Amino acid sequence: MNAPLRSAEVVTFGCRLNAVESQELGRAHASARETVVVNTCAVTGEATRQARQAIRRLHRERPGAEIIVAGCAARLDPQGFANIDGVTRVVAEHAPNRALASVEGTRGLLAIQNGCDHRCTFCIIPFARGAARSAAPSEVVAQARALIASGKKEIVLTGVDLTSYGVDIGEGWTLGRLVRLLLRELPALERLRLSSVDCIEVDDDLIAAFADDSRLCPHLHLSLQSGDDLVLKRMKRRHSRQDAIDLCHALRKERPDIVLGADFIVGFPTETEEMFAATLDIVDACGLTHLHVFPFSARPETPAARMPQVAPHITKERAARLREKGDAALRRHLDAQRGRTLRLLTERGGTARAADFTLARTPGVDAGLMIEALCKGHDGRALVTSVTASGR
């Protein structure tokens, strides 16, 4: 009698899109024998190094397991990964052009877009992910319905270049139009959240949607990368400093309670102290709360790697200063929540998230519940709360 097939165990590196694809990979590589899929990331050289290290460790600890390597780093260097001891197979094909949804965790992750048509000078991901492509709107709605039916109260739309959604479909499809469709077709959905967006691609329909339906979470994370126009030009970003500021003001006009975050790269080649000061300043100019700060990491295959580099110790010091700026902004935001009663979606580990993505401590409360809690204070990172109404 043949042994039953079982989903492969998946070790995931990188972004939310990788997390969604990992669930699909686990099903696709079901086997009767022990199988581990390593879903790699190539956004930095360090991410690729960590994936290689994990593969070698897996082979040492589980020599009988079949190891399959997939993801961005595997697509860029399939032969290099194939040569690592213990690797059975490398999956180098691009992900399929369809909507993928993950039911693991508190939220439902819904990948609606893949690939990127832009060529930022620091980024190698377009070469790993291919051209921008969007899932059909009807398929996105169907996957979202399935997530709600599975019990998800919040759906997060994700993709490589999320705000380019619809560019390959035509017929007037944009991310804003899709968001409106989902909110109209899914009255049972309690929260719809967007992952990282490119500020120059945010369309008017999306901005208006924040004002029209409170179920669209008042939170956006912007891919800004720098607050200096010359650095942005050398990065080959398509927005200016003023574009970013104008967008933040427009969003806040439509949804005054919106909380904004941003990604920044510090120590980009040729960045001077004056240029870095412009990045520090844009935190206040845009009213940002959540910062993701990345010291510049040169990828040999990119144009930025051939530009004059900033000394590592300067990059490290600037990253620390920007993180300190972000920590202060977060503390101010948390201070303002004291005494408020918020509706929270609970997560594993005794934490929860408000609609604006503010983290709260909710020890002893089960995951996956909508609750109301009084904010009594904070610890610098998260709200300290007491539950006033249990949810479902």
Image (cartoon, rainbow, N blue to C red):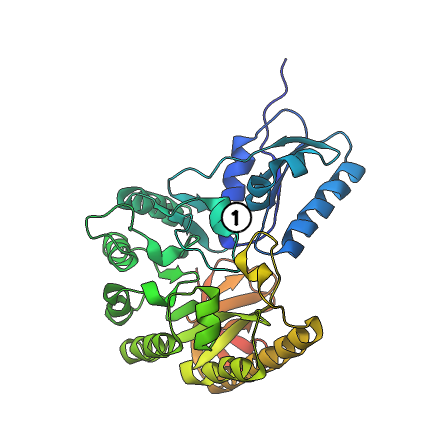
State the residue in front, 142 or 127.
127
State the residue in front, 288 or 279.
279
The residue that mark 1 highlights is 18
Which residue ends up furthest to the left in the rendered image? 171
State the residue in front, 318 or 189.
318
Q: Residue at x 62, y 16 (%)?
A: 2
> What x and y, as percent, mark residue 257?
36, 78
Q: Residue at x 29, y 43 (%)?
A: 136
Which residue ends up furthest to the top in the rendered image? 1
- Determine whether 168 is above or below 346 in the image: above
Residue type at the position of mark 1:
Asn
- Determine whether 65 is above or below 71 in the image: above
Badge 1 element: helix
Quarter of the image for the N terminus: give it. Answer: top right
Q: Would residue 169 be visible to someone looking at this image?
A: yes
- Determine whether 223 is above or below 148 in the image: below
Q: Is residue 36 left or right of residue 341?
A: right
Q: Residue at x 43, y 82 (%)?
A: 287
Quarter of the image for the C terminus: give it. Answer: bottom left
Q: Is residue 295 left or right of residue 121?
A: right
Q: Is residue 109 left or right of residue 178?
A: right
> What x and y, as percent, mark residue 49?
69, 51
